[in-house]
Image (tube, rainbow, N blue to C red):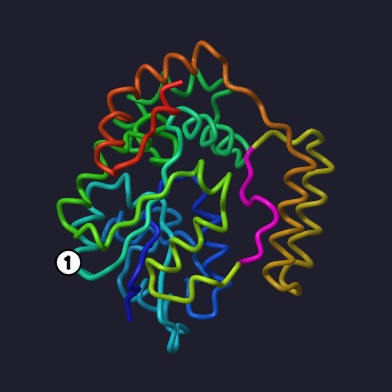
Amino acid sequence: MLPNFLIIGAPRSGTTHLYKGLRQHPEIFMSDYKEPQFFAFEGHPRPGALTERSAYVALFDGAGSAKAVGEASTLYLWSEQAPTGIHESIPTAKLIAILRHPAERAFSQYTFQRFLKTEPLETFEAALAAESQRRAEGVTPFMLYREVGLYGEQVPRYQGRFSAEQLLFLVQDDLESNPDWVFRQIFSFLGVDPAFAPDLRHKTNASGVPQNQTMFEAVKKAGRAVKRFLPETLATRLSGTAHETLLQRPAMNEETRATLIAYFRDDVLRTQDLIGRDLSAWLH
């Protein structure tokens, strides 16, 4: 079977938080493989992505009688091919996108790639300067920090193929300030019990730089060893606590921030018109 809903992005905007919460709902099945990225790269083998349909379909073998069956692949919003593939395969799918202040999203993505040790450049400014060359070389989109945040170019690809009733656009600011309200919105959108309250007391996938690399690696190694024996909600809380305690959050250079805000300005104004939300806070 295929899923009947997808979280389509954007990266570093709270998608893992949503994924963890949705997995707890008794009427929802989420694939164990959080980001198969199938519709972004179908037929084009790529590290970390499932590109064969049979492997993708197998992700949902355990869905049983779940009312809502989904997965969360954050590059679907960015991908030019994903909207067409999704519409051809599951035209009635419900799609959820959560968007974040694009300058902050870009910097968060950079610090996360540094944390993963996949970003070799030691400054955000150097990584931004390398973006055009990287795109030409076909590097992972996760290292195209500006491009992935151009929501005004991405949202119309979905609005042109799916009805308004199939699309739910969320803003990360709301997830930060009122997560219960956000989850009620999602559950209502998916047609499952909106009163269910997931337990997510800590952020997941936080980015940052380890204060002590040796200690951080030791804690992570120990965590992986015991995680498989713990309930998922407890494992999430413990992982979140480790990240919050052991990671330092670097700050973006203010001049770089101002340059990015100017770069994204027209796209932000277009995005707010497309999704019907006041995004003026993203212009500062």
Picture coordinates of residue 154 (x, y %)? 26, 42
Give the left or right position of residue 31, taking residue 166 as reference.
right
Count of numbered marks: 1
Tell me what residue is drawn at x 30 percent, y 54 percent.
40
Residue 281 located within the stretch drawn in magenta: no
Give the left or right position of residue 90, taking residue 13 as reference.
left
Q: Quadrant of residue 66?
A: bottom left
Give the left or right position of residue 226, taking residue 66 as reference.
right
Residue 199 located within the stretch drawn in magenta: yes
Judged from this view, the residue extending furthest toward the top is 255
Tell me what residue is drawn at x 66 percent, y 35 percent.
208
Q: Which residues are magenta?
A: 198-207
Q: Is residue 239 above or below residue 67?
A: above
Residue at image mark 1: 88
Picture coordinates of residue 31 (x, y %)? 47, 71
Picture coordinates of residue 175 (x, y %)? 53, 49
Judged from this view, the residue extending furthest toward the bottom is 65
Give the left or right position of residue 88, taking residue 66 as reference.
left
Q: SS for tag 1? A: helix
Q: Quadrant of the N terminus?
A: bottom left
Foreground of the two, 29 or 116: 29
Magenta span main SS: loop
Foreground of the two, 218 or 104: 104
Tell me what residue is drawn at x 54 percent, y 34 percent.
108
Q: Residues within 10 Å of mark 1 (few under 14, many from 20)?
A: few
Q: Amino acid at mark 1?
A: Glu
